[in-house]
Image: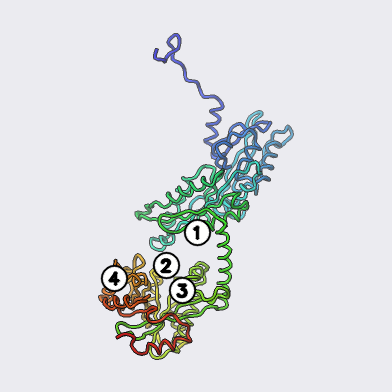
Amino acid sequence: MDGMAEAGGATKPQKPPGRGQLAAAALETLPDGVVSFDADLRVGLVSGRAAALLGLARTARHAQGVCDLLEASPRLDREAVAVIAAACLTATLPDGDAEADLRLAGAPGLRFGIRRATQGTWVLAITPETVLAGGGGIDPLTGLSDRAMFEARLAAALDRPARRRGGAAVLLVDLDGIRAVNQVLGHAIGEDLLRAAARRLQAAVRDGDLVARMAGEEFAVLQSEVTEASHAAALAARLVDLLGRAYLIAGETVVIVPRIGIALAPADGADAALLLRRAAMARHDAPAEGHGAWRRFTPDMDVRWQEARVMEAALRRAVAEQEFELHFQPQVALPSGVLTGFEALIRWRHPERGLLAPGAFLPMAERLGLMRRIGSWVLREACETAMRWPGELSVAVNLAPAQFEDGCLPGSIAALLAECGLAPHRLELEVTETVLLANGDAALSQLLALREAGVRIAMDDFGTGHSSLTQLRVFPFDRIKIDRSFVKDLPLGGDAPAIVRAVTGLGRSLGIAVIAEGVETDAQLRELLAEGCDAAQGYLFGRPVPPDQVPGVIDSLRTPALT
């Protein structure tokens, strides 16, 4: 009868849930993790919360014994496993302690309690600690684990017995663009963005994986049960995709660029500090372009890292012992070709590698926080050298973002000019859009004070950034410098001539002089003259030379170089 009735027409009753099912359902409602066991230390029920706190893989939840279950946890070291198992055994003995509370260094962030549940049954309760000894535990901004928790759990995972030690992967995640958001949109939106990124990270991993905020915009994932490198690669690719998607924060659409480095255990190291360092090397190798990227550690990265450490030590010594020198490249007026001054360009006289151009060491100096000291040295050296030049020849000096940080730049330059005896109008300070974005209103106010004191201000690399035109609206620059990338392509046609024509026209309409850098050929010069460019510098007029060769350059350009 449609399969709905048994003999006699009675409907088959639903089987009520068993006591085991009810007990399991009750366990899932508890805030703490719970594992039940009997007098033989055989595991009964394992709540989902317990599995998550212990970082257990799905198969590990079916372990037969307490020791097997604990040893399968990547978050317990061997000593913690032994202590907890011994306490469980003691609780089951006739004369043993019926209850125990355990806080173990080898079980970071977790507290354990053992209680008798029924006759012949005990429970191991697992409670998360919000704070680790030493002040770590939970990141207050995102609610994720912090660096101390991550490092402790990574060490515990690597300390598991060999027979229970599965593969693990460390993924270090850096979010490029957070600092720009803080500077442009404010720290409140930046913090909301970090929280949103943290939620995406947590949603992308398994229950047994650990996500932590290490510092600033740096996050980390401890991926457990990694039996093949492709598992970590798949997770990294997924994170790059998720984290690189646009965020809507307080009505603002924000995009950041994730960079991820991967190190696998034991292939890339069996020590927690080594794995983190190698993951950081791999992340540093991932390009910060496009929508983000990931890299896995390779041995050649270690070689480059060692070389970089040697270079860093040498650079610190160079700053302390002033192993730098300035070279000076002539700048001429157009169309006359009359020499108007020089740009000061720093060089490093490396004891082994010889004379190094700024691109070989300034990015490292900026990363190491050395730019303020280097910038101060360059300013002094340039001004003292310019005082030995005849007439009204000027000297142009590039400024770094770090030189604006303390707000003292106008005062220090005024004192330097007074000490050297150099007239303020003979000093030109070149700033890029990066400088202005990094320091915002503080940079603009200091530049305005310098300009009011008679120092000339130029915008360098004009046209290569995103808001160069905006900067021209908010600050009265004395000169615009056309980037060499546009000058190089002038004779080739394309959009370079149109850009140069637009910049020179903009300069005329705003009353701002325009200088082109990187002029190397007569063809480039003819294009610049045709567009009415005011000044130029480049190999066509002279290469950068040390101070003792500047008088010869002055003599050679004393008469107009162009007709």
Q: Residues within 10 Å of mark 3 (few under 14, many from 20)?
A: some
- Compared to residue 216, the image places residue 199 above or below, namely above
Q: CA distance from mark 1 to mark 4?
A: 36 Å
Residue 46 visible at all: yes
Q: Total number of numbered labels?
A: 4
Q: Residue 176's quadrant in the figure? A: bottom left
Instruction: Give the spatial CA distance, label 2 vs label 1.
Output: 24 Å
Upstream in the sequence, badge 2 or badge 1? Answer: 1
Q: Which mark is residue 497?
A: 4
Please tell me whether mark 1 or mark 4 is closer to you in this view.
4
Could you tell me the amino acid type at mark 2?
Ala
Residue at 70%, 39% in the rendered image:
86
Query: What x and y, as percent, mark residue 173?
Result: 49, 54
- Do residues under tags 1 and 4 come within 8 Å of each other at their CB atoms? no
**Residue hosting label 2:** 438
Say left or right for 226 vs 553. Answer: right
Q: Which callout, 3 or 4, points to the residue nearer the camera?
A: 4
* Label at residue 285: 1
Placement of the C terminus among the 4 image quadrants = bottom left
Residue situated in front as seen by the camera: 23 or 360? 360
First in sequence, mark 4 or 2: give its number. Answer: 2
Single out the mark in the foreground, 1 or 3: 1
Q: Tell whether 119 sits left or right of 33.
A: right
Q: Horizontally, is 23 left or right of 422 in the view? A: right
State the CA–CA distance, disc 4 to disc 2. 30 Å
Q: Is residue 421 visible?
A: no
* Numbered badge on residue 403: 3
Q: Position of residue 396 (x, y in %)?
A: 41, 80
| Label whose residue precedes the other's in the sequence (1 or 4) | 1
